[in-house]
Amino acid sequence: MTHSLPPIERLKAVMARLRDPQAGCPWDVEQNFASIAPYTIEEAYEVADAIAREDMGALREELGDLLFQVIFHARMAEEQKLFDFNDVADDLATKMIRRHPHVFASAEIRDSAHQTEAWEVHKARERQAKSGDDSSALANVPVNLPALTRAQKIQKRASRVGFDWGDALPALDKVAEEIAELRAELKPAEPPPEKTTGKTAEKAAERTEEEIGDLLFAVVNVARLAGAEAETALRRATSKFERRFRHVEDMLASRGKKPEQSTLQEMDALWDEAKKAERAAAGG
C-alpha cells in the first residue's frame, strides 16, 4: 500500500482492502459491528494499561490499535451507506466546538471545575435530545459499561438531581449496613432445615449474590464521594495483589516449592514481607 497518501487516508485504504470481498482478508470480510465490539473494548483497556505502566512506546502502538477499531467500524458503516470515517470525525469536531463555547465562542469559564459543570450541562442537553420520551436522569447510561464504571455513572446522575449522601462518611455507614446484611445471609441457619431442596439452595445463592451486589454498589458510592474512580481503584488493588502474590511465588520458588506445596501461614508471612518491602520502597 502506497506511502504517498496522508496517514489517515492510507489507513482507510488498508481497511478498504482488508474488507474487499474478492481480494481482502476472509476474517475481516466476515466481521460485523457486534463481532468487532469486544475487540474495541479490549483495545481501550490496553490503552489504559499502557498509560498505567507509563510505557509510551506501548501507548503509541495501542492508540493505533484503538484507532484501527474506529476505522473498522466506520468502514462497515460506509459499506452499508450509513456514514463514513469523515462523518465521524466531523461530528466529533462539531460536538467539541459546541461543548467548549469558552474556547470557540464568547462564553467565559473561570476554572476547570466550572468547565466540568458546563460540560455536564451540555451533555445533559444532548442526552435529552437523544432520549425522546425517556426523561429520566439516568437515561442513556450504556448497559455494557464495566459494572463499577456504570454504577458510578448512575450514582453521579442521581446526585445531580439531589439524590445523594453528600459526604463519604454516611455512605461508609451504608457499607457497614450492607456488610451486616451479607453476614446474616452467609451465616448458617440454626438449627439447619431438615430438608434442603435444590430450589432452596438456588434461592439462597440468589439472595447472597444480591447482598454482594448491594455491598459493591455501596462501596462504589464511597469511592465516588471520596473523589476516587472505583474502576481505577479496583484495578490498582488487583495489580497490587498480583505484584505481591508473584513475590510469594518467587520466594517459594527460591526454596524449591510451589504455592500448592506450602501452608497458608507460610504464604501469609511472605505476603507480609512483600507489603513491608513495598512500604519501605515508597518511603514508609
Image: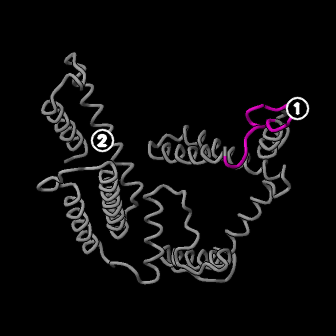
* Residue 22 coordinates in the image, percent (x, y): 88, 32
Q: Nearer the viewer, residue 212 or 190?
A: 190
Residue 154, given in percent of the width and then of the height, sits at 47, 69
Specify start and end residues of the magenta stretch as a single range: 18-34
Disc number for residue 241: 2
Q: Earlier in the sequence, mark 1 or mark 2?
A: 1
Quadrant for the N terminus in the image: top right
Above-or-below relation of 134 to 54: below
Badge 1 element:
loop
Looking at the image, is mark 1 or mark 2 nearer the viewer?
A: 1
Q: Position of residue 276 (x, y in %)?
A: 18, 40
Residue 19 in magenta stretch: yes
Left or right of 282 on screen, residue 162: right
- The residue furthest top is 256
Query: Which of 210/82 is in front?
Result: 210
Q: Is residue 54 magenta?
A: no
Q: Amino acid at mark 1?
A: Gln
